[in-house]
Amino acid sequence: MAGAQEIINIFTNYRNAVYQPEPALAALQSPSEGDSLLPFLTCEIAAETVDKAHWSRELPNLWSKQQVLEWISYYVEKNKYDANNIDFSCCNMDGNMLCRCSCEDLVAMFGPLGEKMFGQLRELSGYNELSAFSLPEELAWIYDYGVIPTEDPSYQQENLAYDAYGSNSDLNIYGKNSSDDPVITLSSYLSDGYDSTMSPASSEGSSLRMIAHSPNSLLSSGSDGELDSADTKFTLPNANRLIDETSDLKHGKRRRGRPRKFNKDNRECQETKKSKHSARGTHLWEFIRDILIHPELNEGLMKWEDRSEGVFKFLRSEAVAQLWGQRKKNSSMTYEKLSRAMRYYYKREILERVDGRRLVYKFGKNSSGWKDEQALNRS
DNA sequence: GATGCCTTTCCTGGTT
DNA sequence: CAACCAGGAAAGGCAT
């Protein structure tokens, strides 16, 4: 366990390394911007410093302790808050623990800043004050796709995973406690879908579904059920790979291509998948497009560089990949793999290359639904 | 069962 | 050095 001094050192080093004075940043931090813009701006700023701030690429519940500290440091510095008022002994937690903190917890730890931090954490986690009934119609397929019947074993396992995170915990950044009305997040919206007809009983923890589906929760579909969630959350995605590696190793060399799913849990996963109706609109480029054409739900994941030309940029590449992975019930999705799939679209002219610009893509002539008028028609 | 499409996964090598 | 890009190869999953 890191001591308070060690934490302060990390904190200080990070601040010195990452947040050297930048005029643009300082301008954005002016009080006149107003709090309402704060979450958005922090996403934007984080994205601009994406090469430095690792936390900005991942969903908060996936952050390591280091990333949590980096985020705290960022936020304290951004708000010019006196770090002496912070109880650093409370900062030694990973993202999962952080996300389970109530607003009161954060206020206790960070004083008046805690409330703002709670708000931003909710933003970064994809919490939105949207009801399921206000979802745009063109995303109705999400309803079709995402319903997980309660008799579905995977759903029951997810609920087990959910319970492991504490179904009776206080209000946390994912929204309400389990007894409240269902809440939808972009994450669950784009990855899991949401069933507006879900009964209160079956919708329990719908806003928390992101936890259950997130890579670190793959306890639910993984093969190692006794792993401690707190300690394994960052290794689980790789744990799948380890299993594959050991089962696929032949003469010291791993077999090429996608490894077969052999183990019992994975077979269950496959069966579950087979039983489910495959929804339309599950293509990657459509998924990307749907994130882009709903900026109000975007969470700073992606942005248009040139809307009229269809040029867009990934701001939180790993977070988008994780969402895509959740959508495809694939815990081990990474930006690396997602980008490979994106590159296949070049040949089919669904996407066009944008040379020399990292994380930037452009819709091609064989894509549709992203242009202003098309998007408006879809709304 | 064969086929085709759309990824997914792994990999090597190059670039930023 | 990490992150990203490019693209070949092989395989999975699914619809037809």
Image: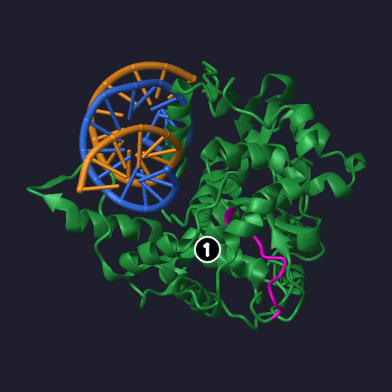
Chain colours: A green, B orange, C blue
Give the quarter of the image for residue A231. bottom left
Residue A213 as seen in the image, left or right of residue A48:
left
Image position, residue A42 (x, y; %): 73, 44
Q: Looking at the image, which residue is at 53% across and 58% down?
A: A62
Q: Quadrant of residue A16?
A: top right
Q: Main secondary structure of the magenta part?
A: loop
Q: Is residue A289 above or below residue A74?
A: above
- Direction from residue A297 to residue A256 in the image, left or right: left
Q: Nearer the viewer, residue A334 or A77?
A: A334
The residue at which mark 1 appears reads as A213
| Camera-nearest residue between A118 and A66 | A118
Q: Percent from the top left, x then y, of residue A186?
A: 68, 53
Across and down, in percent, residue A87 comes to 67, 68
Identified by mark 1, the residue type is: His
In which quadrant will I find the C terminus of chain A? top right
Query: Magenta residues?
Result: A191-200
Magenta region includes residue A215: no
Whether residue A84 sits left or right of residue A355 in the image: it is: right
Circle 1 residues within 10 Å: few <14, some 14–19, many ≥20: many
Closest to the observer, A152 or A55: A152
**Which residue is at 68% across, 19% downward?**
A309
Residue A192 painted magenta:
yes
Residue A258 in view: yes
